[in-house]
Amino acid sequence: MLMWKLLKKNLSLPQLAGYVFAGFAGLSIILFGIQFYADTKPLYSSNDSFLNPDFLVINKKVSTLSTLSLSPTTFSEKEIADIRKQDFVKKTGFFTSSKFGIRASVSSSTFGRFYTEMFFESVPDDFIDVQSEDWTWSSEQNFIPIIIPRTYLTLYNFGFAHSQGLPQISENLIEKIKLTVTVYGNGKTKNFDAHIAGFSDKLNTMLAPESFLKWANAEFGNEATSQPSRILVETYNPGDPLIAKYFGEKNYEIADYRGNTGKAAYFMRLVIITVLTIGLIITLLAISLMLLSISLLIYKNKEKIENLILLGYSRSVIAKPYQILSLSLSVFIFLLAFAVVLIFRNLYIQKISVLFDNAKIDSNIIFTFAAGFIILFIICLINVLWIRKKVNETAK
């Protein structure tokens, strides 16, 4: 306590206030950016998100020559390789089509007996925009989960059912309806139980698990595996103008291309990265200001420090008051910044909940607290080592 009274006389309150303000501003921006990213990530990164960086469904245009079988609509290995080497392509996937006959039937008191011929396609699970625990299949099970486009249900409810006086069907109801799917081919027939496991907003086809379709094509397929007729392409930036230019030059069609949505997702990420960068720069400037203030304070107390060393005080004891000061200010900044982030988080979560009814914000503040604590630890470590270094230099 006596040593602190001796050493604090040259303490500059404006400099310390500047450090507190700059440190608070920088750390608040960083923590806010981290928490905002964690809270809004489901809005643009989950499979069923409206801001998810859209994958593209590519196919060749059907022309008169295609109808006459003079121009194939499938992609060759060379064409696939050319697509993959484009700078905007992150990864690709392919549609696998059923090569066998499929008949689905359902019986209910509401709709009576109903059956239809149908088809299945499959895509890699990475491209499926529906989350379902049932989306698995193995050769030991007699159950097939199916994903259908949400537009099919919309067309039925507001088109066919409305015009024919039939009852409309909710998503919850149709997911509970049990189907019987009969697959046949190569002189074989097998029945499976099935039900709708979800509704896709991005894939306009009847989906079955890829594992099932590979097995069924080998077991019931009536023709050799052909080249894919549709390709899934995930891009780094769906708003990249090179995408439309490249596929336009190749005369390929992009199904339901939503470049503006991709631009929105890309822009959001860019804004978050920019905010975090600004916060980091301000925090580094605050640390520099603190180190400069401590250096000036030690320099002003150079004679006192030398006298204390001559009196037998160790360098660590002399450095301790400065270290405690820097640690106390850093902890205060961290707690203040974290409290402000929590206040603003409550405000924007309410706004998000109003704007997006189906928004799922299930993140917590533990990750942000941990990130802030790591930053606090680094700042404190830098200050402690710097103070020890300056006291040692003064002592020499």
Image (cartoon, rainbow, N blue to C red):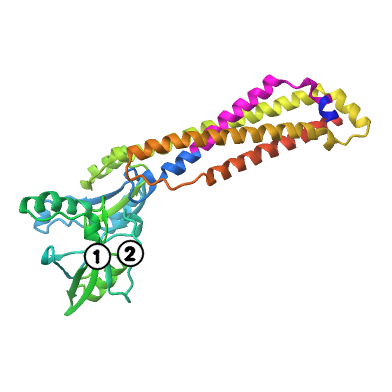
Q: Nearer the viewer, residue 291 or 359?
A: 359
Q: CA distance from mark 1 to mark 2?
A: 10 Å
Mark 1 nearby-residue class (10 Å; few <14, some 14–19, many ≥20): some
Question: Which residue type does callout 2 highlight?
Answer: Asp
Question: Which residue type does callout 1 highlight?
Answer: His
Which quadrant of the rendered structure holds the N terminus?
top right
The residue indicated by pointer 1 is 195
Secondary structure of residue under mark 1: strand
The residue indicated by pointer 2 is 134
Number of marks drawn: 2
Q: Is residue 166 left or right of residue 342?
A: left
Which quadrant of the rendered structure holds the C terminus?
top right
> Is most of the magenta stretch helix, strand or loop?
helix
Q: Nearer the viewer, residue 246 or 390?
A: 390
Q: Earlier in the sequence, mark 1 or mark 2?
A: 2
- Residue 5, horizontal then vertical, whole percent: 82, 25
Report if the CB atoms under discs 1 and 2 are less than 8 Å apart: yes
Q: Residue at x 43, y 34 (%)?
A: 347
- Residue 173, horizontal then vertical, whole percent: 22, 59
- Residue 348, horizontal then vertical, whole percent: 42, 35
Residue extent of the magenta highlight: 6-33
